[in-house]
Image: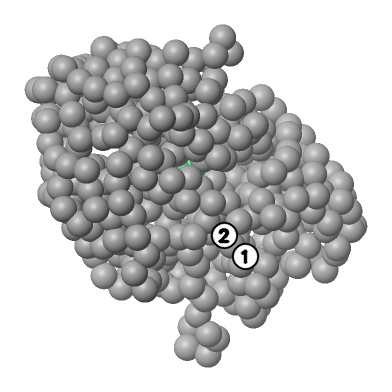
Amino acid sequence: MTATIPPITVPGDKSIAHRALILAALARGTSRLRNVPAGLDVRSTQRALRALGASIAEDGDAMVVTGTGGALATPGEPIDCGNSGTTIRLLAGVLATRPVTVTLDGDASLRARPMRRIAAPLEAFGAQIALTPYGTAPFVVRGNGDARGAEVEIVVASAQVKSAVLFAALNAHGRTRVTGQLATRDHTERLFRAYGMTCEADDGALVVEGPQIPQACDFDVPGDVSSAAFLLAAAAVVPGARAVVEDVGLNPTRIAFLDVLRRFGAQVDVTPASFGEEPRGRIAVRGASLRAIVVEPGEVPGLIDELPLVGVLGAFARGTTVVTGASELRVKESDRIETFARAARTIGVEVETFEDGFAVHGPARFRSGSVVTAGDHRIAMAFSVAARAAGIEVRLDDPDCMAVSFPGFTGALERVA
Ligand code: S3P
């Protein structure tokens, strides 16, 4: 099945690239990072790390990062994290235990997103984080350069919050023990190991002994499975259509979407290629006539970024597709429950919304329409998939927002057979 159609590659994984760049910037020595995606979010992290004293240069298909060894510069002006929640939250963690005072800011969407979720745990290290009265950015981080390890409970299922705490723990003296909601993507834990550090699982907790300085390394970023998901979905909804995506990340905390595709009725074949700290391989999908599914709350952290796409799949499936336990969708790049529902109704899809999810009644009688993306890249890509598969015209108010994670998406979508 996979031999006859040309495989597609997708940009490098955004989540992994942010972390690999941050650790390279904190390392002693020079790291070479391959397949760093060109999307705007990762550029925000690069810009921020340069402002903090790292040198980052392009060399062919690699980024060469000369680290600071942990001695960060104090930038003269606020760091603009653009649209990127991962940049602002992970950097807040890095800065929390270092002797610097830095203002972090972002675009209008990022300024609307909740930041108390990182401020509270980082204050356990003695950092001071001055949020706006709304609990948002811009905010000043006054790091504590003499921080001690802390006991921190993570109360939101968010890899960004968990990672902020783990980054803070790196420069705190002694043992940091992190408990609570830890079952989210584990790239930070894996990349600590890739950079020669430890982050141990201990009786359901994560333990970091500080201080630890990353050792520079060479790292090849696998393709982003959350970007691949749009191409796989475009094949899944058309009986007999196929997509093969090669060299894509297969981290078990990121691929719950593949199981969802199978439950909808698509055929999914995974061929692991190699196992480093971040597993990778090839994913092939063959489309089918889909039937509705129910996504359980426990599955949500493993496919949080794919949920608008699950809604689109539901519009092609027979029956009612239900997602609950996903109130986090309300605080993403847009309120993804409302943005999805409004866009879906515009093209003829029947949707109900709940505080923590949505139900989609399928199959829809699609019609062409104009979609308000709210500048949200995943909404724009999800409805591009719907347009192609349903053979309708969908006018996006802001198609450029797709460049946040997947420059060239429209061309890649055309390659689904
Ligand atoms: C990310 C974690 C997720 C995800 C985001 C990237 C990360 O956010 O939605 O796109 O790289 O850690 P939360 O951790 O806030 O759920």
* Left or right: 88 in relation to 220: right
Taking 86 as reference, is 177 above or below it? Answer: above
Q: Is residue 347 visible?
A: yes
Q: Residue 353 location, x and y as percent?
A: 73, 32
Q: Height in image: 64 above or below 246?
A: above
* Quadrant assignment for the C terminus: bottom right
Q: Which mark is residue 409?
A: 1
Residue neighbourhood size for the residue with mark 1, other residues' Cα within 10 Å, grouped as few (<14), some (14–19), many (≥20) = some
Closest to the observer, 12 or 355: 12
Q: Where is residue 279 in the image (x, y as percent from the top left)?
A: 30, 61
Residue 288 horizontal/vertical position (percent): 65, 69
Quadrant in the picture for residue 207: top left
Q: Which residue is drawn at 18% across and 29% down?
A: 171
Task: Please give left or right for residue 349 compared with residue 7 in the image.
Answer: right
Q: How many marks?
A: 2
> At numbered mark 2, what does the secondary structure look like: helix, strand or loop?
loop
Give the residue drawn at x 90%, y 57%. Answer: 367
Residue 159 or 146: which is nearer the viewer? 146
Seen as rendered, the residue at the extreme top is: 133
Q: Are marks 1 and 2 in contact (CB under 8 Å)?
A: yes
| Residue at the image position 44 percent from the left and 74 percent from the top | 246
Residue 305 position in % (x across, y down) = 54, 45
| In the image, farthest residue toward the front | 76
The amino acid at mark 2 is: Phe
Residue 57 vs residue 117, the one in the foreground: 57
What residue did someone put label 2 on? Answer: 406
- In the displayed structure, does residue 51 sit left or right of residue 131? left
Q: What's the amino acid at mark 1?
A: Phe
Residue at image location 29% in from the left, 61% down from the top: 64
Q: Between residues 252 and 8, which one lies in front from this camera angle?
A: 8
From this viewpoint, is residue 122 visible?
Answer: no
